[in-house]
Amino acid sequence: MGGPGPLRQFIDLAAPQHPTLVDETHLLDARFGVTNIPQNIWIDETGTIVRPAEPGSPAPVYVETDDPTYAVVMQYMHERHPDPGWYSDRIRDWVSKGADSEYAMRPDEVIKASQPRTPDVSRAAAHFELGQHLWHTEGFSDRVFGHLAQAHTLQPENITYKRQAYSAWRRGDSLDPVAFFRQVPEPGEETTWPFVSDFGKDMAALGITF
């Protein structure tokens, strides 16, 4: 929700050879079922979805930097899977073999693996959009908190909505761009943290530890 500003240092550090798009309004959540980051969607040359939204990180690539946040993220990505390049290798297999790749799904498999789009999911998206709009116009107010809480209640498995709420509250009036990424209570904040969960608890519930 913070736009490209908080991401700029990470984009510059990675020095990508392609444009970097920032989905400020979480349109991918509403249209493609993205519920956390990083998630990937495979779309072939015809515009057909080959794999719906799913977790998958590229193999970590270290660069020279003194940024402690970057070091923590790289360590986390390495520890999540015994082979950090496993997902990148799947993509390369698909690029090489196309529809013959064992990782490319048939249309019926894509539909079966896709998240259901219930009326509650649509209502959650509406509440999230309202909360986001209000956050940009009046800061992290009670009204913002209320709409984000409704989004969480209606679609509890959408970790992205929760993480944006954590980030918006954490950011507050701080000018520190890294504040967005501190999504757990810090020492002494146990009684002031306004949420019933945090990023660490959310990942633990999904069976992911860090």
Image (spheres, grey):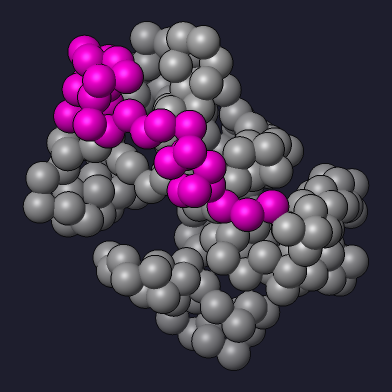
From the viewer's perspective, is residue 21 above or below residue 41?
above
Residue placed most toward the observer, 201 or 62: 201
Q: In which quadrant of the rendered image does the C terminus lie?
A: bottom left
Number of marks drawn: 0
**Residue that extends furthest to the left in the rendered view of this protein:** 82
- Res 24 → quadrant: top right
In the image, residue 14 lies at what x, y percent? 34, 24
At horizontal 20% and vertical 22% (from top left) the residue drawn is: 93
From the viewer's perspective, is residue 179 above or below residue 157?
above
In the image, residue 127 lies at what x, y percent? 83, 58
From the viewer's perspective, is residue 76 above or below residue 147?
above
At horizontal 33% and vertical 42% (from top left) the residue drawn is: 56
From the viewer's perspective, is residue 152 above or below residue 28?
below
In the image, residue 153 lies at what x, y percent? 72, 73
Q: In which quadrant of the rendered image does the N terminus lie?
A: top right
In the image, residue 179 lies at what x, y percent? 54, 54
Residue placed most toward the observer, 32 or 166: 32
Q: Main secondary structure of the magenta part?
A: helix
**Residue that extends furthest to the bottom in the rendered view of this protein:** 191
Residue 164 visible here: no
Residue 74 visible here: yes
At horizontal 59% and vertical 90% (from top left) the residue drawn is: 191
Please indicate whether residue 71 sits to the left or right of residue 49 in the image. left
Magenta range: 89-117
Residue placed most toward the observer, 192 or 161: 161
Residue placed most toward the observer, 161 or 44: 44
Q: Inspect the magenta stretch and tell me whether residue 199 lies in it.
A: no
**Residue that extends furthest to the front in the rendered view of this protein:** 108
At horizontal 41% and vertical 32% (from top left) the residue drawn is: 106
